[in-house]
Image: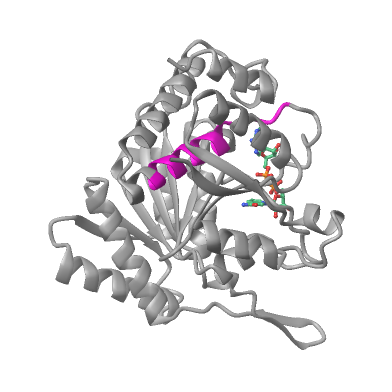
Amino acid sequence: MTYKVVSIPGDGIGPNISEAVQRIFKAAKAPVTFIEKLAGQSALDAGHDALLPDETLDAIRSCGVALKGPCTTPIGKGFRSVNVELRQKLQLFAAVRPVRSMPGVKTRFENVDLVIVRENTEGLYSGIENRIAEDVVVSMKVATRRACARIALWSFKYATHKRRRKISVFHKANIMKMTDGMFLEEARKVSKNDYPNIEYDETIIDAASMRIVQDPSVFDIILCENLYGDIVSDLCAGLVGGLGVTPGANYGKEHAVFEAVHGSAPDIAGKGVANPLALLMSATMMLDHLANIHDDGECAAISARIKRAYDAALEASEKTGDLGGKLGTLEFADAVIARLS
Ligand code: NAI
């Protein structure tokens, strides 16, 4: 049994790290057939007339699962983010970003084990911006009760499934009383009515940011609206070695897209030095997801085998430059393959 999965290499370092992951999947005999589709600048370069071609969306709708490399979005001008469009069009409303200490990667804290759950479809990322006078522009933060309730319920279900102890909402409802206020209301409702056995608390995001860099063990699952989740994910990545070791998944009711937290890293693109681990970790989350929905123990075992292999590579100091090592992207892939047992 193999599962069809859409592979979107993306831009910048994307094709290089995607190649590394596929090399490892092949060596591990992961039960996956990749169907390559384009998105981002690379789709335009290949002659498509859209950043997110219909055929890419249709392929994800048909397979249900995609592994995506990062896509470049210009700053302050140009086209809208292909990532935001993808998440909105497929209603991938829950972004999950596990952050954990990695063996052989020395950081300020040991045993960091956090999960950021981010509402992925609205907030300031709705992209509703207007110029209302020559020198005045506004950006609208959108919160709907439906989306706030949906992500709250999803987070508590996830916490139960993963046997986590606590959910903390980071918010700014003291200032954004209506939007963040609604986010809190819905989280409180689910906590009180449906999941009283899971610890629940709320922290204003500025104080929470300080707290998390002082002592990350205070938190377990962090639940945020869209923008806060984006920022807190990178902040937490810094606690465990950076963006090269922070995976992610975007879940909807029917589809799931797995991708690293990091972007297309234009500063190192084409040099063959990017760390493929965050995408590889996202790919093992994908295998766990496939194993879960198809009740496939073998698929889960292959995922565990890949995880043991990359942990062992890191323990042996086989690392890419961002983690203080000397290996290139594909050399790291080969170091993982050598440890598949
Ligand atoms: P970035 O994450 O691409 O890079 C930030 C820093 O981390 C850079 O110094 C980069 O070299 C380093 N870095 C990132 N990933 C790395 C890896 N795997 N191995 C080693 N070093 C790594 O963030 P930046 O520069 O803000 O964004 C670049 C582009 O990526 C932008 O166009 C942005 O919109 C896009 N982006 C796309 C995302 C996605 O497709 N999901 C997510 C975040 C940003």
Q: Which residue is at the front of the view, 38 or 329?
A: 38
Q: Chief secondary structure of the magenta span?
A: helix
Q: Which image quarter holds the N terminus?
A: top left
Q: Which image quadrant for residue 148?
A: bottom left
Magenta residues? Answer: 273-290
Q: Quadrant of ligand 1?
A: top right
Examine the rendered structure and indicate whether residue 146 appears above or below residue 303. below
Report if residue 215 is visible in the image: no
Verify whether residue 286 appears in magenta.
Answer: yes
Which is more toward the observer, 223 or 154? 154
Question: x, y (%) of residue 43?
Answer: 78, 56
> Residue 12 location in percent, x, y?
76, 43
Query: In the orientation shown, which residue stands out farthest toward the left?
Result: 197
Question: Is 163 displayed left or right of 233 in the figure?
Answer: left
Residue at image position (38%, 41%) is 288
The answer to which of 17 and 123 lies nearer the viewer is 17
Magenta segment includes 282: yes
Residue 111 position by quadrant: top left
Look at the image and name its color scheme: one colour
